[in-house]
Amino acid sequence: MTEPVDHDVDPAEVRRRRQARRSQLRVLGAVAVGGALGAGARYGASLLWPTPAAAFPWTTLGVNALGCLVIGVFLVTLTEAWTAPVWVRPFFATGVLGGFTTFSTYCVDIERLVSAGRPGPALTYMAVTVVAAMVAVTAGAWTTRLFLAAVRRKAGRTR
């Protein structure tokens, strides 16, 4: 028994939509797996370097800055030096690094500091995190571009 066919629908269009849905599900799966790995790494950092409730959250600051540095390196490498499979960017940049960096914990840390009667450190942390994140991503991208340019110059001399 066959299903009824709508003659106004192009079978090629149906196949294209089905393939697009499958592709989106693969990307979503890559992001989910990467996010689990990144969140696990962040949790590991919080176990290695725990922060008492009213203390300055150095671990979260360090994790966020490191994640931003890595994303600067990764995205420049991906866009300027490496043609990666389509799933790599969502897996690593969105998933792993999105799960590793923790701007939700950043907000909770600010609230904890304020609730502990430490508004000065809370404001300092709020500002320093944003500045550190911007400096880190810029430094990662800039340093990677310099490194890639040096590699290309060297490769040009050896030919």
Image (cartoon, rainbow, N blue to C red):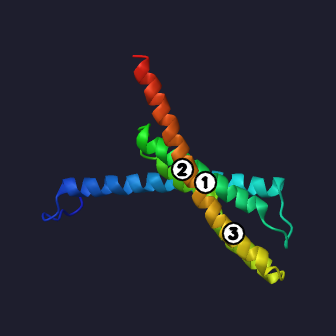
Above or below residue 94? Residue 88 is above
Q: CA distance from mark 2 to mark 1?
A: 8 Å
Q: x, y (%) of residue 3?
A: 24, 61
User: Residue at the spot x=46%, y=47% of the render?
Assistant: 87
| Residue under pointer 3 | 106
Quarter assignment of residue 2: bottom left
> What amino acid is at disc 2?
Gly
Decide: marks 2, 1 in contact (CB < 8 A)?
yes
> What amino acid is at disc 1?
Ala
Quarter assignment of residue 153: top left
In terms of sequence position, does the residue under pointer 1 or pointer 3 come before the other? 3
Q: x, y (%) of residue 84?
A: 44, 40
Check disc 2 and report its element: helix, strand or loop: helix
Decide: marks 2, 3 in contact (CB < 8 A)?
no
Decide: marks 1, 3 in contact (CB < 8 A)?
no
| Residue under pointer 2 | 72
Above or below residue 123? Residue 44 is above
